[in-house]
């Protein structure tokens, strides 16, 4: 019998889950037996399922909904735009698209003042790389291990984690290098300053051995997101800028996760005072209410295409509904003082409370973050830093982290968990009381992590 509208209400969550299980092909998941939740509503920092279970969204739906769920200003802007003009192809000018581009350019650092719109993060990275290659006339792109740049062919090849296609060659011209990671230093450094120096020296060597004249771009996540909330040590981004300038290489920063307020700045590079040539963005630009991403392009790079067509484009580039949500989002950020709120919540609530948890729970190996982008790295032994679950574990080997996540959910808090880390990445508009409630759930869940601890307390 074909499903009818309204069956969901009649049949309860079973119909929703059955349709999902039978007909939705899910990313990053096996297709049979992956458990799910029938989400039917959301507001602010909360979402709920068909059976009335409510969760505090401590993951912001893949670190995306910076203004939370169903923000009335964003919903109204989309409605208003839908009533007026739903779609105009990219070759035409339309008010909201130009307005959003101008608003982004006004907030971007240096001479980054043109915006190429995409539908999401991976496309933004793809186009940033294409622009860099066309601008320099070179083909290689250096990108970091422990990075995530998206799941299209190029973006996945650029990604420096095991999600790269296991049996596919990917796109040519991609070379990976190590970025700084003080807690698990690939350079055996003993402190952040040394880590920074050695990471830069390593890149200089990679550039030399690849041949500087072949390298179009160095691509980094300004703050590494999914792969660990790795903040660049002071001086690292400035060092990258210097190396790039010496060799005519473009610096491309992927701020799909870290941009638009996540670390308390419009663009994360602002926290380190560095201006890249291209910035890829998505997610927080309009909290994902309608898919939107893009590249902020420097005047210099945009100039390459002044009298030569840029060979690329997308039907939905700068979709009016997405741009309307973007304009409203930037207005809300400013009127409600969201950036100040993020800085205050990060430094006055999250930082001290996670550090206090690290004092109480031996399984917390490292605490790091900025603004409302934090990670706890969980270990079995602080001395050896053995992770709570092995790198890239799945199945039974990943069970301890699955239990930590389940303990959070049992407290009504939906966490972001990846490998041996629990990230604290709530919507940026979270109230202090909600934030404290979520952190209390993390505290409870850490008891589960402690139960696997085998090192010296
Ligand atoms: N770059 C970074 C840093 C990301 O975190 C992500 C997604 O999580 C992407 C790119 C890919 O974005 P999308 O999933 O919108 O293609």
Image (cartoon, rainbow, N blue to C red):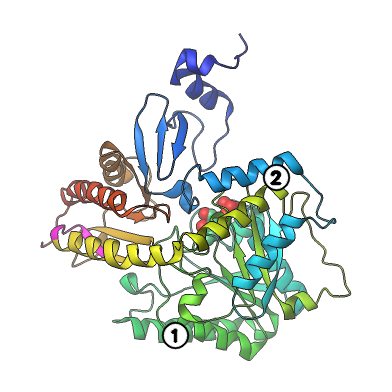
**Looking at the picture, does residue 197 appear above or below residue 27?**
below
The residue most toward the top is 1
One can see residue 364 in this view: yes
Judge by depth and name the residue closer to the eye, 270 or 385.
270
Q: Secondary structure at mark 1?
A: loop
Q: Quadrant of residue 409?
A: top left
Who comes first in sequence, dot 2 or dot 1?
2
Q: Quick check: is 71 in the magenta stretch?
A: no
Left/right of residue 326 with respect to residue 269 in the rendered view: right
Left/right of residue 356 with respect to residue 99 in the rendered view: left
The nearer-to-camera label among 2 and 1 is 2
Pointer 2 residue:
81
Q: Position of residue 129 (x, y in %)?
A: 68, 68
**Looking at the picture, does residue 438 appear above or below residue 406?**
below
- Residue at horizontal 61%, vertical 55%? 326
**Looking at the picture, does residue 126 appear above or below residue 241?**
above
Left/right of residue 397 with respect to residue 63 in the rendered view: left
Judge by depth and name the residue closer to the eye, 405 or 275.
275
Q: Position of residue 33 (x, y in %)?
A: 44, 28
How many callouts does the rendering have?
2
Left/right of residue 457 with respect to residue 187 in the rendered view: left
Magenta segment, which residues? 360-366
Pointer 1 residue:
235
Q: Secondary structure at mark 2?
A: helix
Q: Quadrant of residue 111?
A: bottom right
Judge by depth and name the residue closer to the eye, 326 or 143.
326
**Residue 412 bears which disc, if any?**
none
- Say which quadrant the N terminus sits in: top right
- Residue at horizontal 62%, vertical 88%? 245
Q: Position of residue 456 (x, y in %)?
A: 10, 63
């Amino acid at each position: 019998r074909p499903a009818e509208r309204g069956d969901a209400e009649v049949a309860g969550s079973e119909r929703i889950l059955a349709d999902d299980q039978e007909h939705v092909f899910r990313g990053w998941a096996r297709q049979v037996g992956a458990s799910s939740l029938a989400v039917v509503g959301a507001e602010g920092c909360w979402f709920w399922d068909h059976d009335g279970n409510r969760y505090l969204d401590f993951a912001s739906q893949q670190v995306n909904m910076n203004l939370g769920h169903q923000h009335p200003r964003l919903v109204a802007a989309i409605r208003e735009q839908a009533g007026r003009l739903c779609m105009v192809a990219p070759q035409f000018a339309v008010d909201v698209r130009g307005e959003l581009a101008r608003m982004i350019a006004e907030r971007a650092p240096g001479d980054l003042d043109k915006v190429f719109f995409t539908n999401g993060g991976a496309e933004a990275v793809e186009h940033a790389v294409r622009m860099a290659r066309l601008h320099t006339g070179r083909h290689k792109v250096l990108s970091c291990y422990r990075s995530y740049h998206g799941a299209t062919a190029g973006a996945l090849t650029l990604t420096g984690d095991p999600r790269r296609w296991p049996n596919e060659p990917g796109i040519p011209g991609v070379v990976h290098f190590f970025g700084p990671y003080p807690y698990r230093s690939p350079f055996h450094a003993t402190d952040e300053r040394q880590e920074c120096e050695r990471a830069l020296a390593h890149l200089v060597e990679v550039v030399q051995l690849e041949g500087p004249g072949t390298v179009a771009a160095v691509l980094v996540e300004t703050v590494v997101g999914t792969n660990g909330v790795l903040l660049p040590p002071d001086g690292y981004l400035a060092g990258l800028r210097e190396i790039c300038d010496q060799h005519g290489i473009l610096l491309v920063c992927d701020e799909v996760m870290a941009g638009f307020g996540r670390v308390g700045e419009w663009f994360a590079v602002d926290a380190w005072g560095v201006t890249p040539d291209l910035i890829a963005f998505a997610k927080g630009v309009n909290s994902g209410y309608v898919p939107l991403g893009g590249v902020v392009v420097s005047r210099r790079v945009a100039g390459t295409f002044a009298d030569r067509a840029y060979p690329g484009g997308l039907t939905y580039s700068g979709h009016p509904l997405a741009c309307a949500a973007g304009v409203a989002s930037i207005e809300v950020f400013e009127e409600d003082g969201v950036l100040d709120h993020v800085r205050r919540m990060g430094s006055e609530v999250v930082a001290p409370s996670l550090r206090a948890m690290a004092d109480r729970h031996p399984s917390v190996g490292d605490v790091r973050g900025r603004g409302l982008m934090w990670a706890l790295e969980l270990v079995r032994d602080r001395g050896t830093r053995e992770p709570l679950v092995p790198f890239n574990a799945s199945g039974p080997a990943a069970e301890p982290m699955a239990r930590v996540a389940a303990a959070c959910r049992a407290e009504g808090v939906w966490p972001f968990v990846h490998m041996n880390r629990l990230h604290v990445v709530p919507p940026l508009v979270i109230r202090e009381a909600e934030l404290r409630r979520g952190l209390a759930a993390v505290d409870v869940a850490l008891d589960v992590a402690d139960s696997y601890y085998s090192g010296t307390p």
